[in-house]
Image: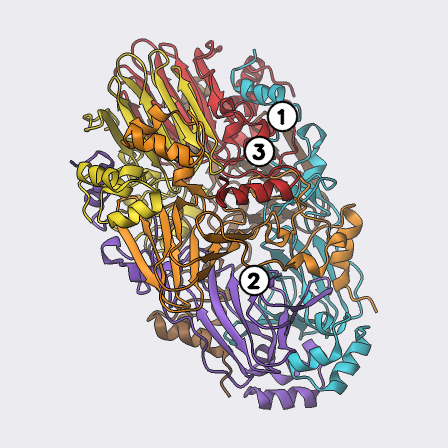
Chain colours: A brown, B purple, C cyan, D orange, E yellow, F red
């Protein structure tokens, strides 16, 4: 018995030499990107493991004493075209996530286990500060593109899950943007009102030149 | 006389070695799909026949005694990027279209000629049933992703036109999903509360294994 | 000092008697919904707590021995217009999440702590089964609108976080759709090929009539 | 038995005094429109008849000897937010549908019964003409916003179904736009290169002034 | 010091042999177009000059005595995926921009320096005329797809900037569409109600045949 | 003569007590905003002046010695739902536009008359600086959400037009976000690595507290 319902899939596969995708579009990372992501992997090449991301554990802490482990379309192709991605974040006691923004993604933080200790906040474009110390399981929404930060203000590690409204969120870290590249110091001073000495000190710290 | 207005099209064609598409994007079915469809056929290769679908007649009835004839982007490339497609459906007297859903498309049914005889219905996610016997020319909307069915409850054939809010609608037929593949019988039983004997009987009917 | 930059916000607030929203659109749940969500709460009425969801803990298990705790726009208005939402799921040992689909949302499951024990799977519209037993921290993508299930196949509880690509995901549970309402038994039989006895038994179990 | 699955719908209805819409957004035509349509009717007020349009029959022919019967969101609220609508068109023998465009909708024409007799065509923005005489059941795609026309070039009536990629398509009829309003004749002449006598004649025919 | 923040970009570049685009998608004009534009140029090949368009000066007047200079995705690839584009327009004294429409773009005109002299207008699909003589700096919105025109009704040149809601707006000029191609004269007459002599005269003027 | 074409508009107006909008959706600023803007003004209340913005001249310079004059949906309702807006910017000789970002809008700058003098630049999320001194008429694209700045590096005033990919762009000015509000100084220091003295100095300059 080959019900007519099979015919639609059959029709597609016979008409289209590529065997058309239905239901999903797993990224073919070798294909050329467009503004909506990657081309679809051919269904015949898709296995259940394309839908599974198995390395979502905390990485090693960086110099800021926190780890950031992303699961985005480039390492988890099943996210292609879905418009969201994930990251695990773990802060050592006293660690700080520096002021940064995600130019085209809203971020949602889900606080991990333990007592209230993760203090986070964002600043709106009319300069209002929204800050909160999160308890275990709290969910916090950080609107798209706004400067925000995080601090472990408690005892022991603070962990959390970040969900982004983009399958490939970008991160603009304030200090790296200002001091970690070749942007001319005089321009930094003029456009930020920072003192020359301060700029020089941070350029050195963040390995910038100019 | 070559009015300046020609210059825009001219500019595009001279700048872009591909001769850019304007006005439409007929599918190049050999191109790699993205989550928004196929690449555009080069306008120089497009003829009026790309905009015409000429085989939209009823097909042969299947074992369920109805025919399903789709006009979708894979056999009618002019639908690329438009977000809708079509199908002709014809039910023999007494025929039934089994319970199914279109995972990412709303369906609109336009009942064909003849007396009221096409009984259709859908079930919402809060389990309310909306059912109706359609008269000639009635239009019926089936919201996206919901289980629905159709039965010819009258005399003679019942025909209709289906319009889908996707240029490539997929169809998940309940019995095929549960019984027409390798899904383990014990999982089917556990997750549907069906008796083992019932599952075994339908696995046999729909050529499933496991 | 009142930098000109303030003028944009000022301009907006003086022109528009509502004080226009910038940066975010927290839901005014009393407002009339459109196909894109709720109207925006007036910024003057928004506080940091609108961005925090504080009740994201496991609820009591249901008759199926699992709990489902949603954080969606209707109980977490900051999700308005963002296109995603969350749920905590916890299965007692041996518990099963019955076959169901989300008519207009992709689901991503992030497996909670403990050894591999959460077995899940989905069925595509061309009837291919993708199933996997997840280990702690695994992320699994379930494409939009497809039938899927979950079973705790290990020792002890199995917990997870579900992320949906909709701020208000709907859930169509197969057995409730077929047996938990007034859908006529003869229609259920005709459209699913189930035996009358089986339908009668499950109608009784799920409190359906007809 | 009240399965936990009911809780999501229950939660929504208890939290939100409006009983939130899930699955669909039938238009509340009394509500204020936005650029994405009308607010949603409250689900408690929705019946199966909201999903049925029952007056889809040919209307009386107009002075151009054809009838145009629309099924759009304003007379079929279930189309709200779906992005498509329908119209029945019937041309008397020899009738012509004048040159017109749909400013923000692609049109798909499905030719009705009878021998090849409906000649239609569109003109692209680089001035290429695509014209075709359609046979019964042919589907023809007219790209968004382009000037197009239709003529019954056969014996007897010619009928068809039009599908638009907008739930509220607008129609700009060339002669009405130029001659059926107060647009100053000298401006019409200057901007169309038509002779004054020709403009005067058509202004009279289409009841324009100026 | 290599802050963890670098890791996201690093991760992307190492996983994806193409070095994934973040932040922007400059068009690779040699790539195959889709309905959402061109593929992205590889970031390693992007320079600051990709973000600069340097030839935005008035061109030579055409036979209608005005110049039209577009900056669209095909000559300014940084506009890829942004959904808008620009054109400079300059009318000699007394010049007219003939009746035309942009099938899929709203146009915004910003009047250039000088006294009020640019008279423009559009006609809605219910045949209402909206016309205005613009003063220096006035901004005028022309809704998508509607017929509109412009006339220099003052002394000296009239210039302006046009912004389109499409990175590749198309232009359908009424006279060229009707008279500048092979569209059969009898069809033009039938569908526009123009006299044969008038059609013949304009076919000659706009170099059409048929 | 009342051609059938009038019937569509007529039908809409008779069915819908609001007289439905077709062709455009001018903002009713008194209506409740949604994530896609304002409700539509009733067409009967719309005049040609709704499509005209007449106050688009340079304002007075601020303390930074430049003027910023926006034309956005809140003062130009015709922009509702269009997704773009405008601003005139004029810098006195030597003036600087401080480092800032538009959280959800791409900005396009069109340099005004005069010799090359407007030096602008943006920093990507992988910390690459793209900077350019613009000549008259140059168009420069600043990708969404990225930090950017502008400096008048020439003689005399420098003016320009800014186009934003949002009808209501927000502006996050770095110094105001860090120093112009109640954000605790110790948090600013921790999250930016700035010295306490520097923070104190700028808090004083930008009237911040905490």
Nearest the eye: A131 or E193: E193
Q: Chain of mark 2?
A: B
x then y, percent, for residue D31: 67, 40
Q: Does residue E164 show up?
A: no
Outermost residue, left side: B1
The residue located at (40%, 68%) in the rendering is D136
Outermost residue, right side: D1
* Residue under pointer 3: C23
Nearest the eye: C181 or D182: D182
The residue located at (74%, 86%) in the rendering is C196
Q: Chain of mark 3?
A: C
* Residue under pointer 2: B108
Q: Quadrant of residue D34?
A: top right
Q: Is label 2 on the same chain as label 1?
A: no
Q: Chain of mark 1?
A: F
Q: Quadrant of residue D154?
A: bottom left
| Label 3 element class | loop
x then y, percent, for residue D61: 50, 53
For label 2, the crowd category at 10 Å Cα-Cα, with few meaning under 14, some 14 to 19 and many 20 or more, is many
| Label 2 element class | strand
Q: Which mark is residue F183?
A: 1
Q: Nearer the viewer, mark 2 or mark 1?
A: 2
x then y, percent, for residue A157: 64, 47
| Label 1 element class | loop
For label 1, the crowd category at 10 Å Cα-Cα, with few meaning under 14, some 14 to 19 and many 20 or more, is many
Nearest the eye: A26 or A99: A26
Q: Quadrant of the N terminus of chain E?
A: top left
């Amino acid at each position: 018995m080959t019900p007519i319902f099979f015919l639609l899939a059959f029709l597609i596969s016979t008409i289209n030499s590529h065997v058309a995708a239905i239901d999903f579009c797993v990224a073919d990372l070798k294909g050329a990107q467009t503004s909506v992501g990657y081309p679809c992997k051919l269904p015949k090449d898709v296995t259940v493991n394309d839908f599974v991301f198995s390395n979502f554990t905390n990485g090693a802490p960086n110099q800021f004493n926190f780890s950031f482990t992303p699961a985005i379309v480039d390492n988890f192709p099943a996210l292609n075209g879905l418009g969201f991605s994930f990251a695990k974040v773990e802060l050592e006691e006293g660690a700080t996530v520096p002021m940064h923004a995600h130019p085209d993604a809203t971020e949602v933080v889900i606080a991990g286990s333990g007592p209230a200790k993760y203090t986070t906040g964002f600043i709106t474009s009319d300069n209002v500060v929204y800050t909160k110390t999160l308890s275990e399981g709290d969910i916090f929404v950080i609107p798209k593109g706004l400067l925000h930060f995080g601090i472990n203000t408690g005892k022991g590690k603070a962990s959390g899950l970040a969900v982004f409204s983009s399958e490939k969120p970008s991160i603009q870290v304030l200090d790296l943007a200002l001091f970690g590249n070749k942007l001319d110091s005089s321009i930094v001073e003029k456009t930020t009102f920072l003192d020359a000495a301060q700029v020089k000190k941070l350029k050195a710290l963040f390995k910038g030149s100019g």
